[in-house]
Amino acid sequence: MTSPTSVTVTVHQICDAIETTLSTATGLQVHQTFDEITEGVHDRALLQVYPQSCTGVDSVNRNDRTTFNRGVAQTEFVFHADVYAQQRAHIGEDMAALVPLIDAITARLEAQQNSPLFGLTVSGVAPIKSFRWSWERVVFEYAEAKHMGVRFTITVRVF
């Protein structure tokens, strides 16, 4: 059995790929990846994508992705995609601004059905093999102001 071609993908590459994909969601006015995040929220419909955590996963399925005597064969990266709809003012208006953004981001995530996921290739290989996501409505406190928003948690599996 031959081992699959291994590629090294960086957190930066994955984060940028997610941000680029989600930034095309209808209604977003500003999008920032981790190294572009500003200290204040000055615009409505802002997307910020950044890394949150990482976990090595021991592959127990013993398929061609398991390497002999190598230990961890897969890695899960967790990214947050925070969407700031508008500064908190009136719950009905805030929710009216937020829900279309949730739908638009969800549509972009659901569109990721074929490889390469999030359009990411490294040396001709698609390193993201699968992903899962969830969202939660949040009232963000940012630069001493409250903003109605949503946090998408995106977990990608790389091997």
Image (cartoon, rainbow, N blue to C red):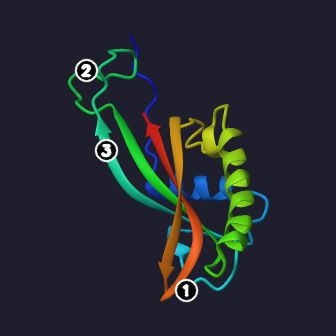
Mark nearest the camera among 1 and 3 is 1
Residue 123 against residue 152 in the figure, above or below: above
The tag earlier along the polypeptide, 1 or 3, is 1
Residue at which label 1 appears: 40
Q: How many marks?
A: 3
Amino acid type at mark 3? Thr
Instruction: Tell me residue 18's x, y (percent).
Output: 59, 53
In the image shown, does 96 or 23 lie closer to the viewer?
96
Residue 36 against residue 68 in the figure, above or below: below
Rendered residue at 64%/82% (across/down)? 89
| 57 relative to 93 in the view: left or right | left
Residue at which label 2 appears: 68
Residue 38 seen in render? no
Could you give the CA–CA distance between mark 1 and mark 2, rounded to whole angstroms?
49 Å
* Mark 2 vs 3: CB contact within 8 A: no
Return the residue found at the far bottom: 144
Mark nearest the camera among 2 and 3 is 3
Q: Secondary structure at mark 3?
A: strand
The tag earlier along the polypeptide, 1 or 2, is 1
Counting other residues with Cα less than 10 Å from the Cα at mark 2, is it few (<14), some (14-19), or many (20 or more)?
few
